[in-house]
Image (tube, rainbow, N blue to C red):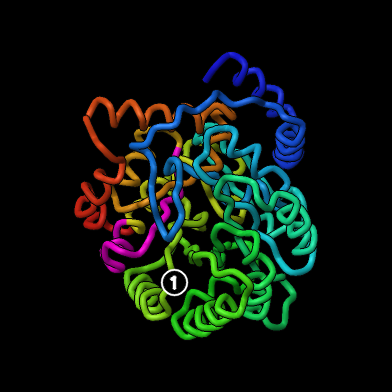
Amino acid sequence: MSVLDRLGQKLLFTFDPETAHGLSIAALRCGLPVGARTAHDTRLKVSLCGLDFPNPLGMAAGYDKNAEVPDALLGLGFGFAEVGTVTPLPQDGNPKPRIFRLTADEAVINRLGFNNEGHAAAERRLAARKGHSGIVGVNIGANKDSTDRISDYERGVVRFAPYASYLTVNISSPNTPGLRNMQAREQLGELLSRVMAARAMASAQPPVFLKIAPDLVEAELEDIAAEVTEKKIDGVIVSNTTISRPPLRSTGTTSETGGLSGKPLFERSTIVLARMRKLLGSDIAIIGVGGVDSTDAALEKIRAGADLVQLYTSMIYAGPALPGRIVAGMARFCETERLKSIRALRDSHLDRWASKPLS
């Protein structure tokens, strides 16, 4: 981390996490901070689901909830950015405080609860950038008090299909009561059928990804893989935050309820990623998320079966120059290893990760 990044982090850490997040969005909206220019390296290009990603590193959903700064994020070096989660109606989310830093672990616990400004606000901003270059996905969710959550996802598909490079169906947040139950096979089958029918009727047909939790057992992963395959979903994002609590060094906030993200999530999320790759086969796209904080971590997700990777929490601790550093590191790795494409790495450690226990 540069001196400037350290100073910026020290300043932001004087504020509570939610205020600091708002300040970082405001800074990006104003054109600051400026990320290091990322060299275009054709070896990092990934062609997937009809999209050409300039590099495999993306910003995960949860940071730019209201589609305020996707182009600024791309300017930091990301190959793609995912906005949301967006729900049909605006909602405040859960009571504050609801974000807790675990600094010793480079982790965060959050129980935000899909706080966002709703479909209309996000659509207005995405419509204003229509025609811009860059891959921007839209992560859609359901309102907490919705009487028909599947209908909320259908509405999200129809509304954002014209603007989204891809759509992500998020049923894996632990902070909306009952949402994760939609990962059960019967509910999931109905959801995916209706989502794909909605896409077929929309004015555009972007790829659809399903975002799953890391807290699933093998039988549940098998059911999800079967439904994804049967319903012809384009890809899976592995994974959201975890409700489990691996051994942590931080004290005081580790017992807070909510989803844990950051470095402690890397192990479990990567095991789930590898097992999903085994279940889905080689053709269905997988995006690996959880604990990516360095070039080495990003490369290991790819070795475990990911086509693309995403990060979020690590930027809280490493600063806005992190994506540029990771992408530059990937390019150096390709040069050192004489790889023609970063994709050559995929699945090279698949068996190693898939054989690890989900403890």
Front position in the image: 168 or 269: 168
- Which stretch is magenta? 274-292
Query: Which residue, given by chain and number where applicable, does mark 1 sit on?
Result: 233
Does the magenta segment cover residue 276? yes
Given the current orientation, which residue lies at the most extreme front position?
Answer: 131
Count of labels in the image: 1
Give amino acid for label 1.
Ile
Image x and y of residue 8, in percent: 66, 22
Which is more toward the observer, 172 or 101?
A: 172
Quadrant position of residue 9: top right
Looking at the picture, how far across and down is residue 102, in whole percent?
57, 38
Determine if the magenta segment contains residue 355.
Answer: no
Q: Nearer the viewer, residue 315 or 241?
A: 315
Image position of 28 with respect to 2: above or below: below
Q: Secondary structure at mark 1?
A: loop
In the rendered image, the residue lying farthest to the top is: 3
Q: Residue at x 71, y 71 (%)?
A: 144
Q: Please name the residue shown 24% across and 35% down the image.
A: 339
